[in-house]
Amino acid sequence: MSTVKVTETSFKDEVLEADVPVLVDFWAEWCGPCKMIGPALEELASEYDGRLKVAKVNVDDHPSVAAQYGVRGIPALFMFKGGEVVSNRTGAAPKASLKGWIEETV
């Protein structure tokens, strides 16, 4: 499974009511570090297919979702379980680091 684009209207269904943990990537087109981690997130979405959903929220297109979670810098990664934030981190990181974070959080 690849990453899922999430909007203000689909956030509740795709993230808060998901039956698996969801890693939400708050990002923007102009953000260099966001583009750097994009391919790693796509790979992780495939590797964790069925066990984890990777969702992407464009902060320029959907600022109210980002504001709701206090996103001030991007990329901002939030891990949701059962509709609640259980962990978050800001900034780009190598795939191995992201995978380690997923393993200890999920």
Image (tube, helix red, strand yellow):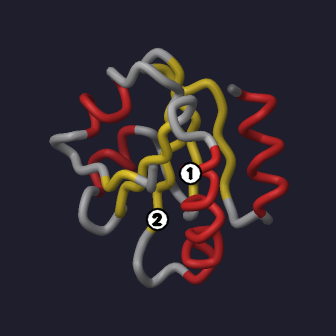
* Coordinates of residue 89 in the picture (x, y in percent): 68, 47
Using the image, determine if residue 79 lies above or below residue 90.
Answer: above
C-alpha span from label 1 to label 2: 19 Å
Q: Residues within 10 Å of mark 2 (few under 14, many from 20)?
A: many
Do labels 1 and 2 touch, CB within 8 Å?
Answer: no
Question: Residue 25's spot in the image, x, y percent?
Answer: 50, 53
- Residue found at x 25% / y 29%: 13
What percent of the width, then of the height, locates residue 86? 62, 24
Give 31 or 22, whichever is nearer the viewer: 22
The residue that appears at 37% across and 24% down in the rendered structure is 18
Residue placed under numbered mark 2 in the picture? 27
**Residue lying furthest left:** 9
Residue underneath mark 1? 46
- Quadrant assignment for the C terminus: top right
In this view, the residue in front, 82 or 66, is 82
- Is 13 or 45 nearer to us in this picture? 45
Q: Viewed as shown, does residue 43 lie left or right of 53?
A: right
Q: Amino acid at mark 2?
A: Trp
**Callout 1 amino acid:** Ser
From the viewer's side, name the closer residue of 72 and 23.
Answer: 23
- Image height of 77 relative to 68, above or below: below
SS label for mark 1: helix
Mark 1 vs mark 2: give the one in front.
Answer: 1
